[in-house]
Image: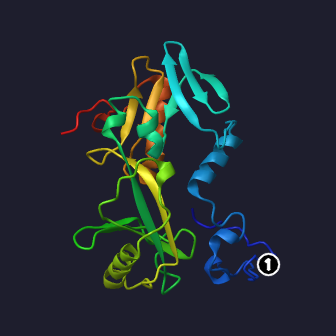
Amino acid sequence: MSPSSAPAPSVRWPCGGSPDAASTRSRCCARPASCGPSWNVPPVVAAASAAERAGARIARYTPVHEIRPDTDGVTVMAEDGEHRFTHAVLAPGPWAPGLLPEPVAGRLTTKAITSTWFPRRDETLFAPDRCPIAIRVGEPAYSCFPSVDGVGVKVNLHVPWEPIGSPESLSRTVPVSYVSQVAAAVAGTLPGLRPDPVRIATFCEAFTPDGHGLLGRYGATGRTVLATAFSGHGFKLAPVFGDIIADLVETGATAREIDHLAPSRRFS
């Protein structure tokens, strides 16, 4: 998300900076997560907040164990008990292999993904209004994202990701060899960035054999919509996927072509 265009508050940031309306976020602080409430809100948090303002109720930190659809609705078996709904959208991400029944679960693999963020040499470079999401093919291959927090530019090196048993077994330790590899890629192809990362994060995602997600009505009752296993691409396409999911829940169909994402499709 881009920083708000509203004047900065006249308070001191935790890092010791003292911004005013003329100052920029990146001049104030090198630790974006520790500063003002509106500068570094993760997209998923922003989306959840918007949903709550629209009347949604979010059950945070509540594991779901089973989904039971029938002709009249869907029963969700969660840590805090049973919940009944007319429809359910299943978007379990890396938990999909353990939550969904066969044969869908057997086609999915949970893998670890590492992202790195690099500082800009010039504050005018890689701004969201000037730099789109980019993908470099060849060697080295990677995805590059604009600096949405005003500090770091995210670079995801395209390498074979390691399968893991479950999200609970994800290791938070990143090998030095990987950091050296992505730093060399940045040094050789992105001269506008300094080649030493300022942030490294590892997470996990569910992958399909063809690298495309599962999106569509799921099950015999028509009461559930599956939206998962986007193999690392879901965030880029979230707005249109949201529209499609709303169509499927409200009308049972969508005008957009999603046959290539059908949960029931065959993989070669």
- Residue 47 percent coordinates (x, y): 60, 48
Query: Which quadrant, please, contains the N terminus?
Result: bottom right
Q: Residue furthest left?
A: 268
Q: Which residue is mark 1?
A: 12
Q: Residue at x 57, y 34 (%)?
A: 64
Q: Residue at x 69, y 63 (%)?
A: 38
Q: Look at the image and name its color scheme.
A: rainbow
Residue 200 visible in the displayed image = yes
Query: Which quadrant, please, contains the C terminus?
Result: top left
Image side of residue 113 versus residue 82, left or right: left
Q: Is residue 69 above or below residue 47?
A: above
Secondary structure state at the residue bearing disc 1: loop
Front-lying residue, 194 or 168: 168
Residue 257 visible in the displayed image = no
- Where residue 257 sits, quadrant-wise, is top left
- Where residue 3 sits, quadrant-wise, is bottom right
Near mark 1 (Cα within 10 A), the count class, few <14, some 14-19 or many ≥20, is some
Front-lying residue, 247 or 197: 197
- Residue 33 percent coordinates (x, y): 65, 69
Question: Amino acid type of disc 1?
Answer: Arg
Front-lying residue, 164 or 244: 164
- Where residue 96 sits, quadrant-wise, is top left
Count of residue discs: 1
- Residue 53 percent coordinates (x, y): 70, 43
Q: Is residue 222 above or below residue 52?
A: above
Q: Is residue 78 above or below residue 85?
A: below
Q: Residue at x 68, y 39 (%)?
A: 54
Image side of residue 32 versus residue 13, left or right: left
Q: Residue furthest top?
A: 71
- Residue 200 percent coordinates (x, y): 49, 71
